[in-house]
Image (spheres, grey):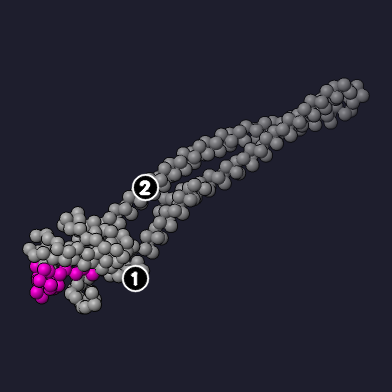
Amino acid sequence: MNKIFTLLMCLLALTLDAQEIDIPTSITVSEQLQPLDEQQCNAFTLNVQGDAKDVKKSFKEFLEDRYALELKGIGSTLKGEALSNSRISDKVFNFVFVIKENGMSNALALYMRLSNGEYVSSEKYADESDVLEHLLKDFAKSFYADIVNERIEEKTDELEKLNKERKKDVSEQASLAKEISKNEKKIAKYESKVSKAQLKIEKYQEEIKSEEEEIAQNTQEVEEIKAENSKTEAKKTEVETDLETNNNLISEKSKELKALQSKLSQLLSF
């Protein structure tokens, strides 16, 4: 049951990954006018898949770690005023970061307003524009890399668990094979006994027939032979019972072995 549960959880995890976040093969940053404070302002935009709260939190941490910039805000917006970082610009600037959630996709918009009141665009501020484009691309790479690394860790853990289950299956398979071999030897032994007992029965039956003519004279001997024959019959019954029991046991163990081999084959096919 635990093995089946582990396998189902792995399949479920793979299904959820496929449904939730699709890791892109390329990242594109666009520049366009976007509404901000009841006006159209130039923004650098990017689509990122994932939970909006996670994206917002990751972007905030990204700016803090990479650029020592702190943005604050609630809901779908982060803001930072009177910011300064020479890697971004030699001017003081404001940042506004807005997330528009659409299912598992999020439209990100980053606005950069300089101290002169103008919003950064590639036409007027090529250097800052280039920095913002690379900043958003680097963020997306970092965000997706964290997701991929988390998946790698999860899949590694799942693989380790499956390998442990496989080792248990292999060990149990070997143990069952030994038990089957042992039972087969017992069967051969009891079949030999049955054969010998049957020969004895035939022998005694011939003796009984031969002695029928001398029944009157050999009554005592006949009774002794009958008694011995009765014991042999009882022993034969016991042997046949043991044989039937062992046959049933072999059948059960063979089914268990086939089931385990089928599970092992399924595990190895992933």
Instruction: Where is residue 260? Give x, y as percent.
Output: 50, 46
Q: Secondary structure at mark 2?
A: helix
Farthest residue in the right direction? Answer: 216
- Residue at label 2? 157
Question: Which sits in the foreground, 159 or 55?
Answer: 55
User: In this rendering, would 208 be left or right of 138?
Assistant: right
Instruction: Where is residue 243? Give x, y as percent.
Output: 66, 37
Instruction: Where is residue 111? Give x, y as percent.
Output: 19, 69
Query: Looking at the image, which residue is at 16% across and 57% down?
Result: 67
Instruction: Where is residue 25? Give x, y as percent.
Output: 25, 64
Q: Quadrant of the C terminus?
A: bottom left
Q: Which residues are magenta?
A: 108-127
User: In this rendering, would 205 be left or right of 196?
Assistant: right
Q: Secondary structure at mark 1?
A: strand
**Quarter holding residue 248:** top right
Q: Is residue 24 visible?
A: no
**Quarter holding residue 19:** bottom left
As measured in the structure, the alpha-carbon distance from the residue carrying label 1 to the one carrying label 2 is: 32 Å
- Residue at label 1? 102
In this view, the mark in front (1 or 2): 1
User: In this rendering, would 84 be left or right of 166?
Assistant: left
Residue 263 forms part of the magenta stretch: no
The first of marks 1 and 2 along the sequence is 1
